[in-house]
Image (cartoon, rainbow, N blue to C red):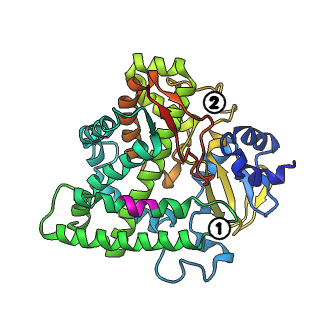
């Protein structure tokens, strides 16, 4: 095997259960490794972190010459997750306003008690079961329910959001080379239906506002910064996806890690105050997002290698998180690791939009789950993983509870 096949091997489903030896090979191969398909793969912490902050790298797929006439040239622009500044900054700032000023308790933080109640209710509904699938029975429904409450979706409509979420997840989680026509069609239809629903619900909140995100969006007082209907729909859907995808993988990867490390599980059971730090370590050790894609707007030189304008650059966040040049004993899980500036949610202006919600949900979920895991056992290890290599996590995690 040669270094130019690393991306192919990392994304090969056969290596999904443990890609970390391949990330080590990537770091040894050099700061920048050109792949057989012409893309460039980068896995060292310091280079990845620097490039995440480099404005010469675009997240907008329209910046690639090959995408001229692509899906975003007709029918509107991408969601702000795939836009560059200054438009990205404008939309992200508007989307974050209802959460409160930066570095102060906001709407999501104020929901900790409600999130804890939802978590306990969900787990209590599983108490009589001898075996559960942590993904389908707990880690998947939890963020769907929480995000619906944040947005202000009536409880009787939450089931519909789970249906839409199924279609969106399936569209994003297909095996490379497979026929994705049906999943793509279903995912696009779910996105359109969800967007229409959210705009209609927001309009209802214009006259009768409540303490929810849609009310805050639609009743923004300043017309110069108010979201259009299209922007409102895209932003709400983005929060739904960003808060959902990261949380499911973070909770499931966390439980799997702790069941594999019973000494650390016991330590957290005895000292639950370590949980916030432990979640940060899980974001480093088993991150929910493994790679980010970027496109140079001009030729960029990195460690003597030129990244050509318009090419594809893949930043391996999970590899940077295990870089021994940055982290002491990177392949060990330390729940109280100091100076843990991981890349689990990315970095820079495109830091994951759903990160605040994912952190609170993961802390709350593990606080409820950890006391119950002492008698739990994995039914299958390694478990079956999702097809998606960039959003890595088990598709199922069967636990024998007693």
Q: Is residue 326 left or right of residue 108?
A: right
Say the numbered circle drawn on residue 110.
none
Q: Is residue 339 left or right of residue 117?
A: right
Q: x, y percentage for residue 184?
A: 54, 71
Other residues around mark 1 within 10 Å, as few (<14) / some (14–19) / many (≥20): some
Q: x, y percentage for residue 108?
A: 30, 46
Classify mark 2: helix, strand or loop. Answer: loop
Q: x, y percentage for residue 141?
A: 38, 49
Question: In this view of the protein, can residue 353 be seen by the observer?
Answer: no
Q: Which residue is pictured at 50% across the width and 67% down the height?
A: 83
Classify mark 1: helix, strand or loop. Answer: loop
| Picture quarter with the C terminus | top left
To which residue does mark 2 refer?
A: 327
Using the rendered view, name the quadrant where residue 152 is placed: bottom left
Q: Which residue is pictured at 75% across the width and 61% down the height?
A: 39
Q: Is residue 123 magenta?
A: no
3D distance between C-alphas at marks 1 and 2? 31 Å
Q: Is residue 135 left or right of residue 126?
A: right
């Amino acid at each position: 095997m040669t270094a130019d096949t690393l991306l192919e091997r990392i994304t090969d489903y056969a290596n999904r259960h443990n890609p970390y030896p391949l990330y080590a090979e990537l770091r040894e191969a050099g700061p920048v490794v050109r792949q057989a398909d012409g893309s460039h793969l980068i896995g060292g912490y310091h280079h990845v972190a620097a490039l995440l902050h480099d404005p010469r790298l675009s997240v907008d797929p329209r910046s690639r010459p090959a995408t001229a006439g692509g899906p975003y040239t007709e029918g509107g622009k991408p969601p702000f997750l795939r836009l560059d500044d200054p438009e990205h900054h404008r939309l992200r700032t508007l989307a974050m306003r209802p959460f409160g000023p930066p570095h102060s308790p906001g709407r999501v933080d104020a929901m900790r008690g409600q999130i804890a109640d939802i978590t306990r209710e969900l787990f209590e509904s599983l108490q009589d079961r001898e075996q559960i699938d942590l993904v389908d029975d707990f880690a998947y429904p939890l963020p769907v329910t929480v995000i619906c409450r944040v947005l202000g979706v009536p409880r009787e409509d939450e089931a519909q959001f789970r249906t839409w979420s199924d279609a969106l997840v399936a569209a994003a989680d297909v095996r490379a080379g497979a026929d994705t026509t049906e999943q793509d069609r279903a995912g696009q239809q779910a996105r359109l239906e969800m967007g229409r629903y959210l705009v209609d619900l927001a309009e209802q909140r214009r006259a009768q506002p409540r303490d929810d995100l849609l009310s805050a969006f639609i009743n923004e007082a300043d017309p110069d910064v108010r979201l259009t209907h299209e922007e409102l729909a895209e932003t709400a859907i983005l929060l739904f996806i960003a808060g959902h995808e990261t949380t499911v993988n973070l909770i499931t990867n966390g439980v799997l890690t702790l069941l594999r490390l019973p000494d650390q599980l016991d330590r957290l059971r005895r000292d639950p105050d370590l949980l916030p730090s432990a979640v940060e370590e899980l974001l480093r050790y088993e991150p929910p997002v493994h790679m980010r894609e970027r496109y140079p707007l001009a030729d960029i030189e990195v460690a003597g290698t030129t990244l050509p304008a318009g090419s594809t650059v893949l930043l391996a966040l999970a590899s940077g998180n295990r870089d021994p040049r940055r982290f002491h004993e990177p392949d060990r899980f330390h729940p109280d690791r100091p100076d843990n500036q991981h890349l689990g949610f990315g970095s820079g202006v495109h830091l994951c939009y759903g990160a605040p919600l994912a952190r609170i949900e993961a802390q709350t979920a593990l606080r409820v789950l950890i006391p119950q895991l002492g008698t739990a056992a994995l039914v299958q290890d390694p478990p079956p993983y999702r097809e998606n290599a960039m959003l890595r996590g088990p598709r199922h995690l069967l636990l024998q509870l007693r």
